Amino acid sequence: MSDPDPGAGAAEAAAEPELHASWLELFFDLVVVVSVALLAGRLHADPGWHDLGRVTVMYLAVWLVWTSFVLYANVTAERAHRQAVLAAMACLAVMAAAVPGVEQHSHGAAFAVAYLVARIVAIRTFRATGKAVLDWPIAQMSVGMLPWVVSIWADGDRQLMWWTLGLLLDIGCAVFGDGQQILDRLNAGRRRDAERVAGRRGRGPGGRGGLDGRAGRRHRGEAVGAGSAGAPDVTAATVNVGHFDERLGVFMIIVLGEAVTQVVTAATHLQWDWSFRAAAASAFVLLVGLWWLTFQYGFAAAPQSKLAGLSARFALPIHFVTTGSVVGVATGLGVMVAHPGAAVPDGHRWLACAALSTYFTVTAVGAVAARAPRSWLLGWALPTVLAPLAVGMLTEGLPGWVVGLSLAAVVWWQVSYGWLRGLAGRRAV
């Protein structure tokens, strides 16, 4: 996740030190578990576009805070500051607590302030390391803070508009920004700061030039020169790919865990007749399929693709969309299991179907980038993008177990690629 590409070469990957998530990082993830659960909870009522948009914006804010501290812990390893990580955890807790009532001004303002504080802590802490992740610069800077500040005094949809603008500015900077140019600007700023500090130290007690103006000027000039030369440059960070891959996986486990929670919770309120058993089994099979695709192929769920080996400006947006899609699928599955013998509400049916189609669309994009076989793209990727949308159209009015079974079949069609390829290989031998 640095320039040059951190995933270049198996020898480099083998040489990097082994780094795993610390107990502090796993403790930090607990508040993400709560955040995802509360965000999914906002979609339990029949969701519309407005509800989906608000949840997506809040989810992106939570994810950006998590991403910043994941990269910070990755770059600093055991030198990560406990106080900074715990401060971010407290901010995420405030953001999560504000989610259910975020339309109220006090809750919305609390969400915005907590987000701002978390980002500022991340930026200041990251900059202190003297390193920068060039292909994800918003880990150590932000161009979208001002809209969030303005949103503190806004209400309702206007507040959501400011949040969206701030997030789009930051994501745009991360995806389209020139990492080397940003690094040069950071270093130029550090040199200017060093020159100002050296200049202040060069002033004597007599004012601008001290007791002897010429001596003061000479002293100040020498100090400025020393400060300019001595200002430490920010260097490109080298991200530990193994640790980064693990942390991306932990987040996916969190959202898959939310899906399991939705299904199990629905089961506690129902009579376990045949329709419930069919719906629950379909949901479980679907989740096993998503788990298998994700951890067999990597977080783009496509052959030959590993997110941690890609540029961060490409890998992290894929991770956001895939995990967000699983949250949508999770919510839809919970409702399907809760209505096993009745028609699934339109909003939830389309939420699950569109989310699964989005998941597989990102899979196809990741596969193209990873140069997956054309046969897989046409025979497996394209059908799984289109099939969930067909399920959404054709299952209107049908019971939940039918919708769940149909979506599970879509997932397992893509899973079958690995089996068929293995079978073909054994026959060839």
Image (tube, grey):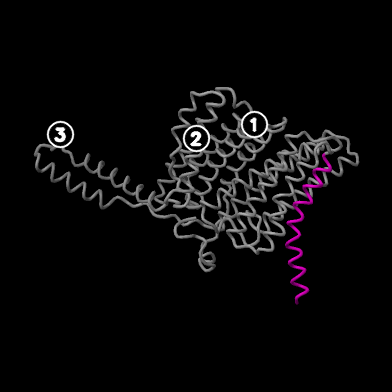
**Which residue is the site of mark 2?**
165
Residue 338 part of the magenta-drawn span: no
**Which residue is the site of mark 1?**
51
Count neighbours of disc 3 (C-alpha within 10 A) and say few if under 14, some if 14 to 19, many if 20 or more.
few
Report the disc number at residue 207.
3
Sequence-earlier tag: 3 or 1: 1
Alpha carbon distance from label 3 to label 2: 46 Å
Q: Which of the two discs, 3 and 1, sits closer to the camera?
A: 1
- Residue type, mark 1 in image: Asp
Sequence-earlier tag: 3 or 2: 2
Count neighbours of disc 2 (C-alpha within 10 A) and say few if under 14, some if 14 to 19, many if 20 or more.
some
The one of 176 and 283 positioned closer to us in this rendering: 176
Q: Give the vertical position of 141 relative to 303 (above or below).
A: above
- Residue 132 screen position, x and y as percent: 43, 51
Count neighbours of disc 1 (C-alpha within 10 A) and say few if under 14, some if 14 to 19, many if 20 or more.
few
**Residues rendered magenta in the picture:** 400-429
